[in-house]
Every structure is written in C-alpha cells, then in structure tokens.
Image (cartoon, rainbow, N blue to C red):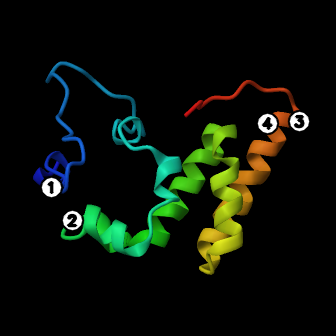
Amino acid sequence: MGLWLRHLPNGLPPITPGPPDQVYALGENRLADTVDLIALFEMDDATFKQHYGGTPIERTKRVGLLRNAALVLGNQQAQAAMPALRKALENETEEGLLDASRWAISRIEESISQGENEVVTK
C-alpha cells in the first residue's frame, strides 16, 4: 500500500495495513469500509479538490470518483443510495457518471423487486 493512501489529507481517516499475517481476498477493498460512498455525491468540485487535491485520487476527478462510487453502490444493492443516484441523474452531465448511476439504480430496483435484503444500510 502506497504511503499516499495511508496519509490522506484534510482530516480523512488514515488507512493502515492490517497485521502481516492477515490475508485479504482478491478484490476485497478495505478503503470502501472507511469512505461514505453516498456522501461523495454531496461533494462539489471545490470540496473534492480540498479533500483529494495532491493525491492520486485527484487524477480520477470528481465525476470519475462518483462513477466508481455509483458502480460500487449498485453492486452492493444499496437502497439508501437511491436519492443520491437520482440526484446525480438530475444534476450531472458527464455521460460515464450518468450511465453508471442509471445502471446502479436499475440494479438496486431489481434487487428490491426480487425481495432481496439490502446489503448496505448507510
């Protein structure tokens, strides 16, 4: 894990590696456990730059981070994310983010119609 990831600026929680003997499954993302993905949708460009400026996350730009967050929320079938995803459809213009938000909404709606339990509650 790179040094930049352990020391995020502006009050974001530090991320420390687990014990050396702890093995994580391929694809497991411990960062997702510390970031409120839904709250990212409230971030404007200035707030994004304040939080992530000077880090590799800045390269994704705000819309890229939101696109990725929408995909994760859709995969998690996070019903609580529906208002944020719908707001993104109303307010954003970047096609990749719009596509990801539409996909996430359809995935969540599908899980609701199939009666699946919500995976993410925050």
The percent position of residue 20, horizontal first and vertical second, equals 14, 24
Q: CA distance from mark 2 to mark 3?
A: 40 Å
Looking at the picture, tell me which residue is in the foreground, 64 or 41: 41
Q: Can you say whether 22 is above or below 106 in the image? A: above
**How many numbered marks are there?**
4
Label 4: which secondary element: helix
Looking at the picture, tell me which residue is in the foreground, 80 or 110: 80
Residue position marked by numbered label 1 in the rendering: 4
Q: CA distance from mark 2 to mark 4?
A: 35 Å
Cβ atoms under marks 3 and 4 closer than 8 Å? yes
Q: Can you say whether 60 is above or below 5 in the image? A: below
Task: Please tell me in which quadrant of the rendered image residue 121 appears.
Answer: top right
Q: Residue furthest right?
A: 113
The residue depicted at 35 percent of the width and 35 percent of the height is: 30
Three-letter residue code for mark 1: Trp
* Badge 4: residue crowd in 10 Å (few <14, some 14–19, many ≥20): some
